[in-house]
Amino acid sequence: MLQTFFSRPPHSGRSFSASAPGSVLTLPWHMPRLSKACVVPVFLPFGGCHARCVFCAQHEQTGQTPCPPGAPGGVRADLSAVLAAARRELESRAARGLPPAETAFYGGTFTALPPAEMAACLHFARGARNGGLVTSFRVSTRPDRVDAAVLERLRGEGCGIVELGVQSFAEHALAASRRGYDRSAALEACARVRAAGLRLGVQLLPGMPGHSPADFAADVRLALDAGAEMLRFYPCLVLEGTELARIWRGGGYAPWPLDVTLGALAHAWLAALEAGVPVIRMGLAPEESLARSLLAGPVDPALGCRVMGRGLLLAVRRALRRAQEDRSSFAVQLPVAAQGYVWGARRELRPVWEDMGLERIFWSREPVVRILLSGI
Ligand code: SF4
């Protein structure tokens, strides 16, 4: 019968020795965080996008209607309204005594916005910074729309982070999704962002057309090696109104099953944790419009906790394997934060842990996982 304790386990101070009785395997388990600042987003669905990518339905994903183009040289009316609403939200936060936030321009290709619209966004961000409402801002964009000049301009305006919607570095997946750039262009874009003194975020799309779990594992490695300081994983979904929906209906695309997605994300999340890089989003936010337009794909409201539970299990299993442990029972000391995900959803992982030989769990405030091999 598995038992849990709110205390440090006996022998937890011992150093690891693979074969000694009572030995302890220690895994650093520090959950990286980006910043404490609250992000107030400004959504610009398809703003600056020169074409619509096969899988993309930004208006359904963000719950916002796409901005119709404004008069030549002018600023579309709804952009002005969106910026005014964001300003009101920031002012309301300040009036409630909340600390300055960060603002973010999401949902399109920020660096390819028409000049007047980019200027309006930067004017808004500058005003919010000068007024002490935000500390910084971030933008999301495509790898093939970032040149040194626009990055320099963003940096000069107080931008801190550029998130690149790379989706994948795999040539065949990029071609199958008609992204319009290749792996070297994506890697060069990552390097350019960093060379401009901006922090790099990379968004990946596991399960996009032509993509395999092995591609995704390689994508995560490449993104980390390219200096990504944060990652987002958006498993590919088939949404009504997209080109992918048409291809899916014709039998030319099948989304990854949920169990494959959970396994691939668990490996990816663990790789990021071990590299000290936060995964700031897994899966699309649950918008009502998204649920209405979803045709197929791996959606799960408990995705994050199911992935992290599998990641923890994977880390412990690997450590036991590395130590060539064939003991039939062990205990673990886990950080208290892992209480929210150790069993996945609806305790689905508990039998797996028990089959592995887990007998006791000790909860601790230490950011480590300790595996106590015997003498418990
Ligand atoms: S560039 Fe990004 S926002 Fe624009 S259509 Fe493609 S995926 Fe969607």
Image: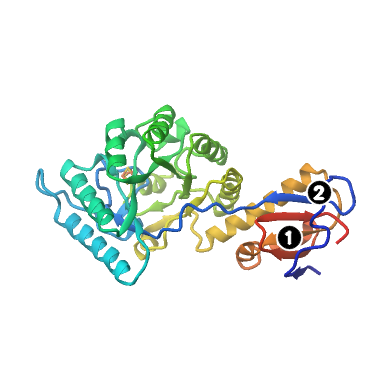
Residue at image position (29%, 55%) is 43
Residue 276 x %, y %: 57, 46
Q: Amino acid at mark 1?
A: Gln
Taking 166 as reference, is 146 left or right? left
Q: Nearer the viewer, mark 1 or mark 2?
A: 2
Residue at image position (48%, 46%) is 231
Residue at image position (34%, 32%) is 180
Query: Residue placed farthest to the top in the image?
Result: 184
Residue 295 x %, y %: 41, 56
Marking on residue 283: none
- Mark yes or no: residue 243 visible: no
Which residue is disc 2 drawn over? 15
Mark found first going from the N terminus, 1 or 2: 2
Taking 218 as reference, is 244 left or right? left
Q: Nearer the viewer, residue 129 or 2?
A: 129
Separation (CA) of disc 1 from disc 2: 14 Å
Q: Is mark 1 within 8 Å of ligand 1?
A: no
Colouring method of the image? rainbow
Which residue is disc 1 drawn over? 333
Residue 63 x %, y %: 31, 61
Q: Quadrant of residue 40?
A: bottom left
Q: Amino acid at mark 2?
A: Ser
Residue at image position (15%, 44%) is 116
Mark 2 lies on a secondary structure that is loop
Q: Quadrant of ligand 1?
A: top left
Q: Quadrant of the C terminus?
A: bottom right
Q: Quadrant of residue 48?
A: top left
Residue 165 x %, y %: 39, 42
Count neighbours of disc 1 (C-alpha within 10 A) and say few if under 14, some if 14 to 19, many if 20 or more: many
